């Protein structure tokens, strides 16, 4: 095993890899509770029964998708990178696809499955990288930042910090309300932990917030900590049963959006973490195809289990900082996700006040992409700005991507830089215009 994972070549050992795997798990364990809360739409009041997904089943699907994805990445691609259902894309799945577009979650999960299969095919042929390379870096950064704003906005709503206002659309909430104060407390605690650079800060922030909520009576105490694994039956295999429902213009746009977001997440994370670990050779990422396949396979398997797109996690950098260098780190993380299946009773204490701080902090981290955009070039600033601002304002990640992709070729052509725009970008701009004219309600 040491030889397979190249311990000697990478200067690592079992102890170091185990600590790194545990560190990575603690840094991303929040997804076990945030993902079920997001996909079940638990923070949205007054929804019809069955509109959101079953939280217990999603909890199991999240843990299994993370475990299987991390195992594939660790054993097959041999990178110290863990995978789990991605933040941002789960928000798009829940709040845009289900809530705003009115698409049943059963159809949306089928779209996730199809996107995973497409990922595998495009990865095998090399087309996946060519398509994404056609999208300029400025728009990739704008999409990431826009998703960050959207996630943070959802967090502020869930916390009751931002509420509906008939006169101004939005306004500040009631700061005398117990749940809102608890969420604000959670934000402050998590910010302090993040500022102190404590590994697993987001997860620990949720634990502390939940504990304070229970102690103050704002959250009902769980009846037990360890319990039986919830049934995955409400979500398992549903994607396979509804593949025939995705052949609509709306769902094609949804699958394309799944594709874009997942690739941005995976490509950026792979390069960043591999570079941190010193694994990039001659400015190339070894076994990049295998890493991409691991991501695509994890998305496909995760959809069958019943969760939104599974992707590589930037929190893996915490494990690398702790000494992780080989795929064994990801294997250890996978084992902890399987162990976490026993802690499903804790889902009852993870209210919107507990998850809101995590969403807000993740949003802050994603908005850092704004620094990579050249705002002095107006032809770049316009599509980038429209991309990131329309996501929270329209409550739709897909709308933000569409508007940005429409304006980019226009501003670049007017500036005399039309030849720098890839033909694929012109084609996508036309597709998105037709979408707004004929499809979007």
Image (cartoon, rainbow, N blue to C red):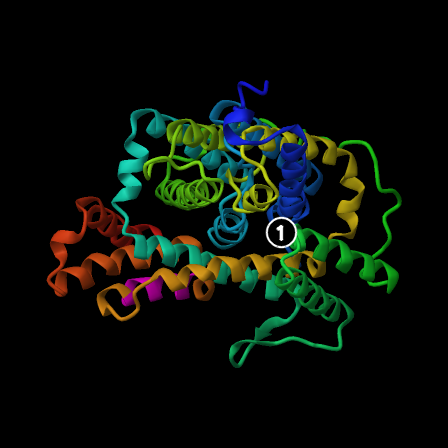
Specify the quadrant that holds the C terminus: bottom left
Q: Name above or below for residue 95 compared with residue 29.
A: below
The stretch drawn in magenta includes residue 388: yes
Name the residue carrying label 1: 41
Residue 33 location (% of width, % of height) = 68, 46
Specify the quadrant that holds the N terminus: top right
Q: Is residue 119 left or right of residue 109?
A: left
Looking at the rendered structure, the secondary structure element under dot 1 is loop
Residue found 76% across the figure and 39% down from its top: 344
Q: In this view of the protein, which residue sits in the foreground, 28 or 413? A: 28
Q: Is residue 384 left or right of residue 217?
A: left
Q: Is residue 242 visible?
A: no
Residue 171 location (% of width, % of height) = 57, 77
Residue 81 location (% of width, % of height) = 53, 37
Q: Is residue 141 left or right of residue 94?
A: left
Q: In this view of the protein, which residue sits in the foreground, 388 or 393? A: 388
Q: In this view of the protein, which residue sits in the foreground, 404 or 249? A: 404
Residue found 28% across the figure and 39% down from its top: 131
Q: Residue furthest bottom?
A: 167
Quadrant in the rendering for residue 219: bottom right
Residue found 33% across the figure and 50% down from its top: 439
Q: Which residues are magenta?
A: 381-391
Residue found 22% across the figure and 66% down from its top: 379
Total count of labels: 1
Q: Is residue 345 visible?
A: yes
The stretch drawn in magenta includes residue 250: no
Residue 64 location (% of width, % of height) = 63, 31
Q: Is residue 265 left or right of residue 213?
A: left
> What is the magenta segment's predominant secondary structure?
helix
Quadrant in the rendering for residue 157: bottom right
Within-10-Å neighbours for mark 1: few <14, some 14–19, many 20+: many
């Amino acid at each position: 095993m040491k030889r397979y994972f190249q311990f000697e070549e990478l200067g690592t050992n079992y102890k170091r890899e185990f600590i790194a795997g545990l560190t990575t798990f603690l840094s991303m364990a929040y997804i076990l509770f945030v993902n079920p809360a997001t996909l079940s739409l638990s923070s949205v009041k007054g929804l019809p029964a069955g509109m959101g997904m079953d939280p217990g089943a999603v909890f199991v699907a999240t843990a299994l998708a993370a475990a299987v994805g991390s195992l594939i990445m660790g054993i097959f691609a041999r990178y110290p990178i863990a995978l789990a259902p991605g933040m941002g894309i789960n928000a798009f799945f829940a709040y845009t696809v289900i809530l705003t577009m009115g698409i049943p979650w059963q159809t949306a999960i089928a779209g996730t499955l199809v996107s995973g299969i497409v990922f595998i095919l495009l990865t095998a042929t090399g087309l996946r990288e060519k398509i994404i390379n056609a999208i300029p870096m400025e728009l990739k950064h704008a999409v990431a930042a826009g998703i960050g704003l959207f996630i943070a906005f959802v967090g502020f709503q869930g916390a009751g910090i931002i509420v509906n206002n008939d006169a101004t659309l939005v306004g500040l909430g009631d700061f005398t309300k117990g749940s809102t104060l608890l969420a604000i407390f959670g934000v402050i605690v998590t910010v302090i932990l993040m500022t102190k650079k404590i590994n697993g800060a987001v997860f620990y922030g949720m634990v502390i917030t939940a504990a304070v909520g229970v102690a103050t009576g704002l959250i009902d105490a769980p009846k037990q900590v360890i319990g039986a694994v919830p049934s995955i039956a409400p979500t398992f295999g549903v994607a396979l049963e509804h593949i025939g429902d995705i052949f609509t213009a709306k769902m094609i746009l949804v699958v394309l959006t799944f594709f874009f977001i997942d690739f941005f997440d995976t490509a950026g994370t792979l390069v960043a973490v591999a570079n941190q670990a010193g694994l990039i050779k001659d400015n190339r990422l070894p076994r990049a195809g295998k890493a991409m396949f691991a991501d695509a396979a994890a998305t496909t398997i995760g959809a069958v289990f019943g969760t939104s797109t599974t992707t590589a996690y930037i929190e893996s950098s915490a494990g690398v900082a702790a000494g992780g260098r080989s795929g064994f780190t990801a294997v250890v993380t996978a084992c902890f996700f399987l162990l976490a299946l026993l802690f499903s009773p804790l889902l009852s204490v993870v209210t919107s006040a507990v998850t809101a701080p995590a969403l807000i902090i993740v949003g802050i981290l994603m908005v850092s992409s704004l620094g990579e955009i050249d705002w002095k070039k107006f032809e770049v600033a316009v599509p980038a700005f429209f991309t990131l601002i329309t996501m929270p304002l329209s409550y739709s990640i897909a709308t933000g991507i569409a508007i940005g992709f429409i304006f980019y070729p226009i501003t670049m052509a007017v500036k005399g830089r039309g030849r720098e725009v890839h033909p694929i970008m012109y084609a996508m701009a036309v597709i998105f215009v037709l979408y707004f004219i004929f499809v979007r309600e």
